Amino acid sequence: RLVGALATLGGFAILAFMREPARQAAAGLDRGCSAIMTEFKEMVSYFRKPSFCVLITQACFGCVPWFALNYKTLFFQLGGISDSQASFIDVSSQIAGALGGLLGGLLGDRLERCSKSHGRPVVAQISVLSGIPVAWFIFKEQPPASCAFAYYLALLFILSLTATWCQSGVVWPILSQIVRSDRRATILAWATTF
């Protein structure tokens, strides 16, 4: 009930305070096979953009650690952390990841203002490089026996807070800049399929 009430309040707040910019109606929408061919041609045109190809290639490799981290709860349980503690660590990391996404977007915007060409790539580099030593300590170093829960909780919170900047601070903004404004939602949808 609480989540439903908060979602409803959020919807009304968005309706009251956010104005959607006026858009022109799309002229001559295709239907059926013609729509599929039009979308296919548009998708092929994205692959002619080097930035799109680099981002998609990076995403293919960049998602591997995140898929591996899906097993972190099992890792903690096998390492002697109780089920409730392991689930608390997992929930905390998800909350930190949400905050990290927000932080990544803010940092990406701020550094892009400082350097149009280098700001967002610097955010990605900081994000990835900050995650490497933290992941090392989580998975390669033995935690202190007396405080393994606190050790894993702190490290995974830091990892989730810092290693999540790439998508919101780099990938999505760059993708939305390399296409026409009427194709932004489509490019983001295609990017999430890879």
Image: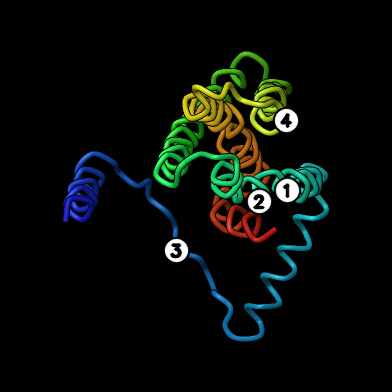
Whether the residues at callouts 2 and 3 have beta carbons within 8 Å, the answer is no
- Residue on which disc 2 sits: 67
The kind of residue on which mark 4 rests is: Lys
- Residue on which disc 4 sits: 140
Whether the residues at callouts 2 and 1 have beta carbons within 8 Å, the answer is yes
Q: Quick check: 77 left or right of 83? A: right
The kind of residue on which mark 1 rests is: Val
Q: Based on the displayed image, in which of its 4 quarters is residue 116 positioned?
A: top right
Kindly give the residue lying farthest to the bottom in the view shown: 32
Which comes before the other along the chain, label 1 or label 4?
A: 1
Alpha carbon distance from label 4 to label 2: 18 Å
| Marking on residue 25 | 3
- Residue on which disc 1 sits: 64
Residue shown at the point (54%, 33%) measured from the top left: 160
Alpha carbon distance from label 4 to label 3: 56 Å
Whether the residues at callouts 3 and 1 have beta carbons within 8 Å, the answer is no
The kind of residue on which mark 2 rests is: Phe
